[in-house]
Image: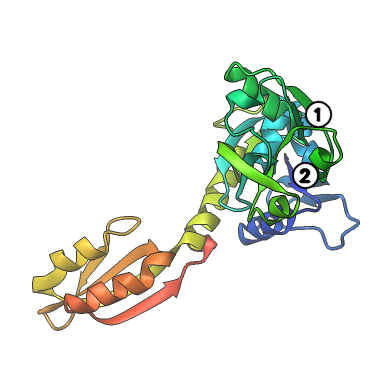
Amino acid sequence: MLRIAVPNKGMLSEPAWNMLSEAGYRLRSNPRQLIVEDHDNDIELFYLRPLDIAVYVGRGTIDVGITGRDLLLNSDTQAVEHLPLGFGASTFRFAAPNESSISTLEDIDGKRVASSYDKLVGDYLHERGIEADIIHLDGAVESSVQLGVADLIADVVSTGTTLRNAGLRIFEEPILHSEAVLIRSPRLEENDERLTVLQRRLQGVLTAQRYVLMDYDIPVSKVAAAVDVTPGFESPTISPLHDKQWAAVRVMVPREKVNNLMDRLYDVGARGIIVTALQASRI
């Protein structure tokens, strides 16, 4: 069986569960269940703390796992990022007090930096020739400056409201753009058939989330113009209709572009446009 670690709680947990469910895998039936054996799909799910998933996968006791890129890079393990999963996006940034003179990476040299991701931050600064005292805190790092523990912080930022409320301002470029990723054990071959099946199913879910199926009729003389408007995820399927002057087109298009594409298709003479959500099982 392929052993898969999934987050048991936190912001990545529910999207990860939903993705696996849409991919056709069986999940746990109650929140106390820590292990699920899905014999039909030849997998075993392990519900683990998000912080620990990369450690288990890196040491080879678990084959693959779903975790954050930031957690992977901070884990100091040999686990390998295999596939970005398109959810749980976050940005990792430096922030200093509003009244501080710290505004560049060079200003961090010799300073105290509080973070829950001490390895990630330490590696980032070391690669740039900057030496700093990295102070590990498990949470609420924005309080560390006010309490005199650190001169600045490095933390995950979404809206920045929490930092502003703590009297901190973001500076410099992001340390990291993170998202949920599928990671694999260094002991698992990249072309392992079990991993290939899992990857194919997850990519099917991603495609179904990002694309929709668009059908429309177009005059034969306008087919080329319509295809230019909707080149699609793959080449459009063009079929003749009973009325020889018209053709039917079927194509997958990005979900977020549907309204714009419909307007442009009507402009070139399309009619009967139908948009249908994709199902992962169809990919």
Residue shown at 68%/29% (left/top)? 120
In the depicted structure, whether residue 118 falls above or below residue 21: above
The residue nearer to you, when weighing 54 against 125, is 125
In the depicted structure, whether residue 66 falls above or below residue 136: below
Q: Residues within 10 Å of mark 1 (few under 14, many from 20)?
A: some
Q: Residue furthest right?
A: 32
Q: Earlier in the sequence, mark 1 or mark 2?
A: 1
The residue nearer to you, when weighing 147 against 256, is 147
Q: Label 1: which residue?
A: 135
Q: Mark 2 belongs to which amino acid?
A: Glu
Residue shown at 91%/56% (left/top)? 32
Residue shown at 14%/83% (left/top)? 243
* Number of numbered discs visible in the structure rendering: 2
Q: Label 2: which residue?
A: 142
Task: Residue 249: give x, y in percent of width and height.
Answer: 25, 70
Task: Residue 257: give x, y in percent of width and height.
Answer: 37, 66
* Res. 64 in view: no
Relative to 119, is 127 on the left or the right? left
The residue nearer to you, when weighing 148 against 2, is 148
Q: Quadrant of residue 169?
A: top right
